[in-house]
Amino acid sequence: MFIHCELLVLILGLTLDGRVHTGEIIGGHEAVPHSRPYMALLKMLKDNGKTGYCCGFLLNQDFVMTAAHCQAKSYTVFLGLHDFHNRNGVQQLNVKQTYPHKDFHDEKNDIMLLKLSSKANFTKNVKPIALADKDDVSPKSCLVSGWGRTERYDSNSMSVTLKDVTVTLSDNEKYALDNMYCSEGATGPGQGDSGGPLVCEDGKAYGVVSFYKENDLTYFTKIPDSTSWMEKAMMHETID
């Protein structure tokens, strides 16, 4: 009974407002179980007392990366999760400190680090992912993973298992935004997947799922552009 109740809370939390949190994978397929060991599901208690969800991804034993608009009063981080009905071996950790990008505003610099209250335990199902830097070649074909709706306008089509979808990044200048990658198309992350990683051909995370616009445009905050801020945050320096 507990599992079914929490699943209902998950579904409701994903549909509370216009900027829905956690994976709405449109046109994707179920991921091979535990093939994305860096993925994290974030259960958030918001200031208004409501529960919401975002995705994130593990960087090391101490930090998870997500979107800055996924700020909340408190978090429970699920690591090693594939099927929400089966939490055997899943690690549940709290968050000690949040580090939203110092220049986060609306849709800009939508990236945040979460310092875990205790260290993640690396296993075959829980592993970190490497981040791209400015020396890496610009990506083209990438993967997005998440939990959530499988049909854009059907609030009852939530998936309890992790799903994957491949996106192709656009080089169309009319869609370009500073510090953002953009993908076009009806398949991909839609009204959600917030905070999940954009993982490209070399297996590195290049971006963070941020927001989508009309005409099936999805934007991802560029990780390589935030390297300096990230290093300071992870060293617990003051970000000003």
Image: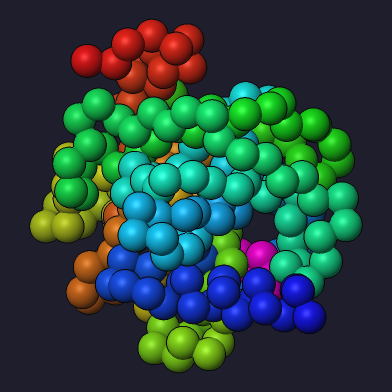
Find the residue positioned furthest to the left: 174
User: In the shown orientation, is residue 210 left or right of residue 193?
Assistant: left
Looking at the rendering, the stretch of residues picked out in magenta corresponds to: 160-166
User: Of residues 1 and 29, which is closer to you in this image?
Assistant: 1
One can see residue 13 in this view: yes
Between 74 and 166, the residue placed more toward the observer is 74
x and y, in percent, of residue 199 in the image: 53, 46
Relative to 76, is 121 above or below?
Answer: above
Q: Vertical placement of 126 versus 144: above or below?
A: above
The answer to which image quadrant residue 225 occupies is top left
Give the quarter of the figure containing the N terminus: bottom right
Q: Nearer the viewer, residue 129 or 65?
A: 65
The image shows residue 191 at horizontal and vertical percentages of 36, 71
Residue displayed at 45% across by 38% down? 206
Residue 38 colored in magenta in the image: no
Picture residue at 47% right of the left edge, 71% below the top: 13
Residue 224 seen by the camera: no
Taking the image as shown, residue 133 lies to the left or right of residue 166, namely left
The quadrant of the image that shows the C terminus is top left
Residue appearing at x 22%, y 36% in the figure: 104
Find residue 106 and report its horizontal and vertical position in percent. Answer: 18, 48
Q: Nearer the viewer, residue 50 or 239?
A: 50
Q: Is residue 165 magenta?
A: yes
Task: Determine the main secondary structure of the stretch shown in magenta.
Answer: strand
